[in-house]
Image: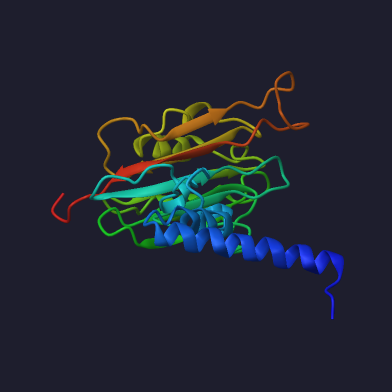
Amino acid sequence: MRLAGPLRVVVIVLTAGLTWILVSVLLGTQSGFSRLQQLLSSPENSPTSEPRPKKYKCGLPRACPEHSFAFRITSGAANVIGPKICLEDKMLMSSVKNNVGRGLNIALVNGVNGELIDAKFFDMWAGDVNELLKFIRPLHEGTLVFVASYDDPATKMNEETRKIFMELGSRIARDLAFRDSWVFVGAKGVQDKSPFEQHVKNNKNSNKYEGWPEALEMEGCIPQRTADV
């Protein structure tokens, strides 16, 4: 029985290909087989495909040095998208975890072992600033303090609150105002101002969102404290 036209063409092509591979192997070159492997290999395994950039803890582009903690903080976007605080690939605060809210979102972390001590948010528009003070007054030496704003971080702030944040290493706390964007990492007992702080003022002429400035994202590596420091 004669093969149909298209099927006959397929048989001829396969026969020619197998013959080519067999001849290549017999001649010791194996080039035919190697090329067939390349043709059948997936694009991900192709030597010409671009390698995917490696991501490290909390999505950082580079690994942190030994004896340091990797972190990434994102402030809230307007009053729509909540903030995020990630440390050592663990999400400490986020909308998914359902533990963020309007105002100041604060995570307290043990500076020696990186373990989360507590995480809460404090409404700085209609809340009670004394609740925030109860949270940050009794900090132990070496406690890391991660802060991300959402909506309004400052209306209820008083002088004592601003002073405590400045003692934790903030340069911005004194001037933080209504609906500013702010992310900050400080520590109890620091001697100098923290290098981990970003701030964008609420300005109707430059706001990215109507009534709010752009969201902030900050990442880095925090030196781990030793137990005897």
For residue 150, side relative to residue 139 (left or right): right
Residue 113 is drawn in which quadrant?
bottom left
Question: Looking at the picture, does residue 188 appear above or below residue 162?
Answer: below
Residue at the (41%, 53%) spot, across then down? 57
Q: Is residue 99 visible?
A: no
**Closest to the observer: 46 or 40?**
40
Find residue 105 and report its horizontal and vertical position in percent: 54, 50
For residue 48, side relative to residue 66 (left or right): right
- Quadrant where the N terminus sits is bottom right
Find residue 120 and report its horizontal and vertical position in percent: 52, 58
Q: Is residue 143 visible?
A: yes
Find residue 166 and report its horizontal and vertical position in percent: 39, 34
**Closest to the observer: 54 or 158?**
54
**Residue at the left extreme?**
228
For residue 155, side relative to residue 66 (left or right): right
**Closest to the observer: 201 or 222?**
222
Residue 109 is drawn in which quadrant?
bottom left
